[in-house]
Image (cartoon, rainbow, N blue to C red):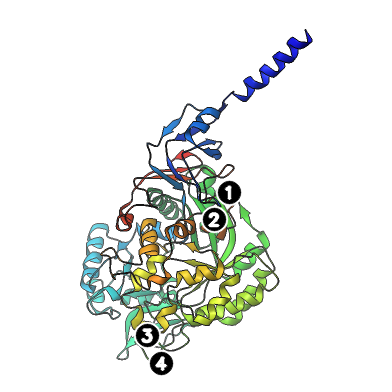
Amino acid sequence: MKKLSILLFFMSIVSCSHEQQNVDSIVINANVYTVNDDFSKAEAFAVKDGKFVAVGTSEAIKAKYASENIIDAQGKTIVPGLIDAHCHFLGLGFNQQAVNLVGTKSFEEVMQRVLDFQNKNKMPFIIGRGWDQNDWEEKVFPNNTLLNKMFPEAPVALTRIDGHAILCNQAALNLGNVTIDSKIEGGEVVIENGKLTGVLVDNAENLVMNYWPKPTRLDKVKALLAAQDICFDYGLTTVDDAGLNQEAIEIIDSLQQSGDLKMRVYAMVSFTPKNLDYYLNKGITKTDRLNVRSFKFYADGALGSRGAMLRAPYSDKPNHFGLLVTDLATFNASAEKISNSDFQMNTHAIGDSANHAVLRTYNKALSGKPDRRWRVEHAQVVSQEDFDLYKNVLPSIQPTHATSDMYWAEDRLGIERVKGAYAYKQLLDAYGKVALGTDFPVEQVSPFLTFYASVARQDLEQFPEGGFQKENGLTREETIKGMTIWAAYSNFEENEKGSIEAGKFADFIVLDKDIMTVNLNEIPNIKVEQTFVDGEKQ
């Protein structure tokens, strides 16, 4: 009897060891890039309660797990859900409610788009975004003479593609009583021949936009949901919104809590003294979908509008050095405050002078405080001697800026200084990781254009031959890490997302081509066939 009991006991153990565990879904027969520490590949994984529970071969996963939802990937490539480490998610949504000026090849085309938009929508206030004078035959800032004739009454504000300059008609300038005598620190009211041109650069934009009608809560909800649809189509499952106010953050939180907004958001709080004090007192906000633990600062403007702060004058505009947007006293005091909290400081710095100032401030504030992951957003032009200062500062970069700006960057910077511009490999070597984003809607949303620009360093016509400063291109493996696990790391979220590993959120995407092996020139055309967040198809 005793022997029989022992036999039955061992039989029960064997039986239990072969009993399958029920899970919510199983994916098999896939070409999975896990992006784990070993950058290993797999064929299958199981998902339960929104997380990966196991990753391995199709045979092993099917043997151990059972599910009513088995997805046969039929050899398709699967990668972790993509993270855009620097974008303007809410801004993308608002752009769907404005005149789209991206890709215009002349000022006349800009005017035609504005006219077509207004004839259709009859708006009391007209807003647009996307013009870039560098794409026109005459590469100079426009003026508002034609705009005033076409729209003598309705205020019009047309934002440059980088957001660092706007063109206003006289009706818009009148909102803020802007005159040739108007001055503002960190901004420029552009004047030609003693007259207003209507162009306002950096902080000068506020002279008009502070009087512009504010979007309603409903406007913001519509914008967020519209942006979500666009981003899911491109396989983005987390977005780092580089500059949000308290109201926008609270709307995002409420939409996520209600289940309407599935997108995960890493929110950078736009710096104002009020916002700084409020969130430092409130502390970090962290849910599965929302992370509020960083502040967004601006050191300078943009290179395209000559607002980037340079250490020597612009090569194509003698005696012009750009603009310091935040005064150093305020910046340094804020850094000291933030360094004594658990919050991260993320600063827009384009020019070499701005990068130098930010890096010196960061390194001083972070002395004796390792692993704070403070970020420089863009890190676009860096003096060679300053790359060493990035050893403790995380570069957050946008590869498509290099391929958008390469046609005129040398004109702005000169043949020697441009060598330290868009130097992504040097930045990677300095810190050991880079976080990759797009800066949409400054650039297009597509992360595949990011990937292509990072590796090929060319435009879509394969120009220039051999790539723009190709020595600073990244490998495919470095690039996919920058869009997944390194971006998660930049958000202090590497233990919950960024790779396909047991215990992490089941955020993944199915691609129509193998991004790691396909011909380089086919990468921009890769399509996302399915996007999953928490194991749920979006």
Disc 2 or 3, which lies upstream in sequence? 3
Q: Amino acid at mark 4?
A: Asn
Q: Amino acid at mark 1?
A: Glu
Q: Which mark is residue 432?
A: none
Q: Are marks 2 and 3 in contact (CB under 8 Å)?
A: no
Residue beneath the point at 68% across and 65% down: 341
Q: Which mark is residue 414?
A: 3
Q: Disc 3 versus disc 1: distance between alpha carbons?
A: 44 Å
Residue indicated by mark 4: 319
Disc 4 or 1, which lies upstream in sequence? 4
Q: Is residue 137 left or right of residue 373?
A: left
Residue 271 seen by the camera? no
**How busy is the neighbourhood of tag 1: few (under 14 within 10 Å), some, or many (20 plus)?**
many
* Residue closest to the eye, 389 or 315: 389
Q: Which mark is residue 496?
A: 1
Q: Secondary structure at mark 4?
A: loop
Say above or below: 486 vs 514. below
Q: Disc 2 versus disc 3: distance between alpha carbons?
A: 35 Å
Q: Amino acid at mark 3?
A: Gly
* Residue closest to the eye, 346 or 93: 346
Q: Secondary structure at mark 3?
A: loop
Discs 4/3, front: 3
Residue beneath the point at 30% across and 58% down: 521
Q: Are marks 2 and 4 in contact (CB under 8 Å)?
A: no
Quadrant where the C terminus sits is: top left
